[in-house]
Image (cartoon, coloured by chain):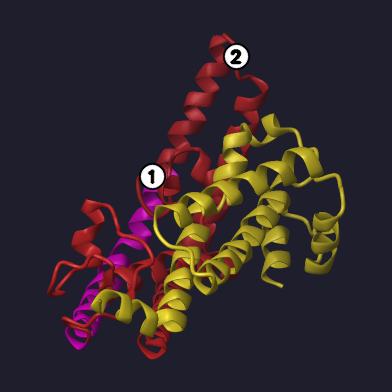
Chain colours: A yellow, B red
């Protein structure tokens, strides 16, 4: 709902605005994106969800150390690049270069990823971590 | 160990909503702010379009027009920042008091275990007020800052209070000198 309202506000006219369901349907199929903001919103929100999802996985596994951070950054940026350029075939120049697409929502999703990684890692493996520290 | 971390996430969600709620009451809903915001967004988009079309143009008249628009945008942004300034100070004080209260509650307590060892200049934050030199111990403040970074910005975006991308791209912000820096 909020996405719809935002789109209406940004476009200035409601005729072009899409509902959340329409946007989701377009996001999972190859589509034309007339409204750049809409496509950037899709990238932003999917990245947040993906960051939290990866955080949970990393915490359950558990992945440790610098490797976890590098893997997250690599996978997150790689998937956004492949999704935008190869799957949706968007013109990167229209968005100010591929870098603009890659960094869209990165820091926020990185923070979300760290929080879920730390919480799940601590919650699920606390006894094992303490035992390892004690020995 | 779940209880501490979940409590911190909860605190962070509450303070984010409280902060946004206060700002909404004092700033976002005022007519002056809304008028200025609409103006800034309209001008940013216009400027962006104009720069795209005449990007490499050497025409002096066009350049002058762009400069004039930039100046106008800068003035409007300054007005917008001024509108927000007072509230920012008020909420700033309130949150500093809240934060010091939570800090004293969690003082010296290891709230989580980090799955990585932070780099040295972050260790001061992640190991704040903790004894020992095991840097995988996580302090309240580090987890709280991470939660806030993620939750507050998402809430702002969800509620439509975040500055538009067009306005951020022009390098002038509604919330500070460089709005894109935390993205």
Relative to A11, does residue A134 appear above or below in the rendering? below
Image position, residue A112 (x, y; %): 49, 66
Q: Which mark is residue B56?
A: 2
Where B12 falls versus A111 (above or below)?
below
Displayed quadrant of residue B124: bottom left
Residue located at (68% from left, 59% from top): A9
Quadrant of the image containing the N terminus of chain B: bottom left
Q: Which residue is mark 1?
A: B178
Q: Nearer the viewer, residue A6 or B119?
A: B119
Mark 1 and mark 2: Cα distance apart in space: 25 Å
Front position in the image: B25 or B173: B173
Q: In the displayed structure, would residue B118 be above or below residue A121?
A: above
Does the magenta-highlighted stretch encompass residue B57?
A: no
Q: What residue is drawn where x is 22% and y is 52%? A: B121
Q: Chain of mark 1?
A: B
Is residue B61 visible to us here? yes
Is-magenta flag for residue B95? Answer: yes
* Picture quadrant where residue B13 is located: bottom left
Q: Residues within 10 Å of mark 2 (few under 14, many from 20)?
A: few
Could you say whether the residue bearing mark 2 is in a helix, strand or loop?
A: loop
């Amino acid at each position: 709902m909020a996405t719809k309202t935002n789109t209406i506000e940004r476009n200035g006219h409601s005729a072009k605005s899409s509902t959340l369901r329409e946007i989701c349907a377009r996001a999972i199929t190859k589509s034309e994106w007339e409204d750049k903001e809409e496509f950037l919103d899709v990238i932003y929100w999917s990245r947040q969800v993906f960051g939290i999802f990866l955080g949970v996985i990393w915490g359950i596994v558990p992945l440790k150390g610098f490797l976890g951070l590098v893997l997250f950054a690599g996978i997150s940026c790689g998937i956004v690049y492949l999704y935008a350029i190869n799957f949706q075939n968007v013109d990167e120049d229209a968005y100010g270069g591929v870098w603009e697409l890659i960094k869209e929502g990165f820091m926020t999703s990185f923070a979300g990823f760290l929080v879920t990684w730390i919480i799940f890692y601590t919650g699920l493996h606390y006894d094992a971590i303490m035992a390892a520290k004690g020995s | 160990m779940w209880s501490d971390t979940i409590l911190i996430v909860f605190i962070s969600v509450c303070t984010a909503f409280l902060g946004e709620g206060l700002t909404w009451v004092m700033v976002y809903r005022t007519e002056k702010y809304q008028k200025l915001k609409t103006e800034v967004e309209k001008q940013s988009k216009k400027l962006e379009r104009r720069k795209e079309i005449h990007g490499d143009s050497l025409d002096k008249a066009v350049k002058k027009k762009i400069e004039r628009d930039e100046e106008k945008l800068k003035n409007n942004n300054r007005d917008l920042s001024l509108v927000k300034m007072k509230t920012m100070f008020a909420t700033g004080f309130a949150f500093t008091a809240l934060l010091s209260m939570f800090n004293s509650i969690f003082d010296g307590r290891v709230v989580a275990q980090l799955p990585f060892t932070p780099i040295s200049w972050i260790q001061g934050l992640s190991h704040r007020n903790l004894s020992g030199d095991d840097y995988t111990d996580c302090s309240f403040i580090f987890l709280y800052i991470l939660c806030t970074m993620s939750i507050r910005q998402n809430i702002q975006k969800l509620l439509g209070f975040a500055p538009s991308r067009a306005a951020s791209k022009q390098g002038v912000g509604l919330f500070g000198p460089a709005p894109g820096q935390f993205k």
